[in-house]
Amino acid sequence: MLAIPLRALWRPADLHLAGQGGISPAMLTVAALYKFTAFADTAALKPPLEAVCAANGVAGTLLLAGEGINGTIAGTRAGIDAVLAHIRALPGCAALDWKESLAETVPFGRMKVRVKREIVTMGQPGVDPRAGTGRYVAPADWNDLIRQPDVAVIDTRNDYEVAIGTFAGAVDPETRSFGEFPAWWEANKDRFHNKRIAMFCTGGIRCEKSTNWLIGQGVEEVFHLQGGILKYLEEVPEAESLWQGECFVFDQRVSVGHGLRPGGLSTCGACRRPLDADDRASPLFETGVRCPHCAGEYSEADRARFRERERQMRLAEVRGERHLGA
């Protein structure tokens, strides 16, 4: 689950561009990107990437690993363009693809560049999307594919993501993390005998790995929604859409809908699960402290810590500042 940083304070004016007084909310661009490529020295790539993000007032999270780069960033049009140009100049990234949306406020508290073992954690040795993936299906062709009776549609995302939206008729593996998917497939693969498999995820990266893994397991016909749910919601008219609900995103917008418009959800300050109006109306809900989904998951010491964090956030708000736990 996404860990949102809870330390330090942030003010909109802290994000700036040379020659500009700050990032205007009307100008914010959010770019979600990934690229599987071989990086020989990720530690050497980190400082220059941090520097270009800082110089251009860009916030978000970027992950570097030996298998490539993954992340989401937000900033002005010029700032995003500068960071994307830097990334495209990295080894194997010239053909970088990304998806964009807009936000009225900065959906991240700060910029983080992290070196990881994997850019999306599956934990399966030998999985390499560069060696082959499922057949890409453009959003415009996705409806026709998943309506076919011999096609099984599988949502590769986590349970809390699926809970707020998915494609009609899609199979929910009910996994808490992507690393659980291989075990789920092994336990359920007989259900899909003689079926073609169509897989999807938020932006496409999890399907790069899961379809490569399925091919390695001997599944002959595997398909992959190109650009993921985000590209589908951007390109397919709502009147023609088979998507139901909203799409969870890993930033402070929480979710987006058709046309990539921000959704109406919030997140629990304790467990970070998405919450709707009914969740917030529950007697088990306490702002920043608990929700109906995690009411039995934390100790009293944890709850006390969450209440103090909530108090600090409210104090920061009074001062006209933004606490990173917000």
Image (cartoon, rainbow, N blue to C red):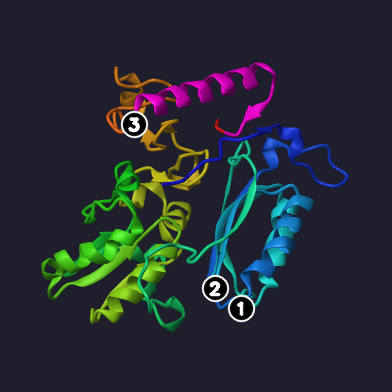
The dominant secondary structure in magenta is helix
Q: Which of marks 1 and 3 is nearer the N terminus?
A: 1
View extreme (front): residue: 301
Residue at 68 percent of width and 33 percent of height:
10
Task: From the viewer's side, name the closer residue of 153 and 243.
Answer: 153
- Magenta residue span: 298-324
Q: How crowded is mark 2: few (under 14 residues within 10 Å), some or many (20 or more)?
A: some
Mark 3: which secondary structure?
loop
As shown in the figure, which amino acid type bears the numbered disc 1?
Answer: Ala
Find the distance from the CA under tag 1 to the CA under tag 3: 41 Å
Residue at 68 percent of width and 25 percent of height:
321
Residue identified by numbered label 3? 298
Residue identified by numbered label 2? 66
Task: From the viewer's side, name the closer residue of 264 and 110.
Answer: 110
Residue identified by numbered label 1? 40
Find the distance from the CA under tag 3 to the CA under tag 2: 35 Å
Residue at 62 percent of width and 36 percent of height:
105
Find the distance from the CA under tag 2 to the CA under tag 1: 6 Å
Q: Where is residue 87 in the image (x, y as percent from the top left)?
A: 67, 66
Q: In this view, does 126 lie to the left or right of 254?
A: left
Position of residue 262 relative to residue 86, above or below, is: above
Q: Is residue 52 visible?
A: yes
Q: In this view, does 67 lie to the left or right of 87?
A: left
Q: In this view, does 150 lie to the left or right of 21?
A: left
View extreme (right): residue: 19
Q: Which of marks 3 and 2 is nearer the N terminus?
A: 2
Residue at 45 percent of width and 37 percent of height:
263
Give the label, 3 or 2, closer to the camera: 3
Q: Is residue 320 magenta?
A: yes
Which mark is drawn over residue 225? none
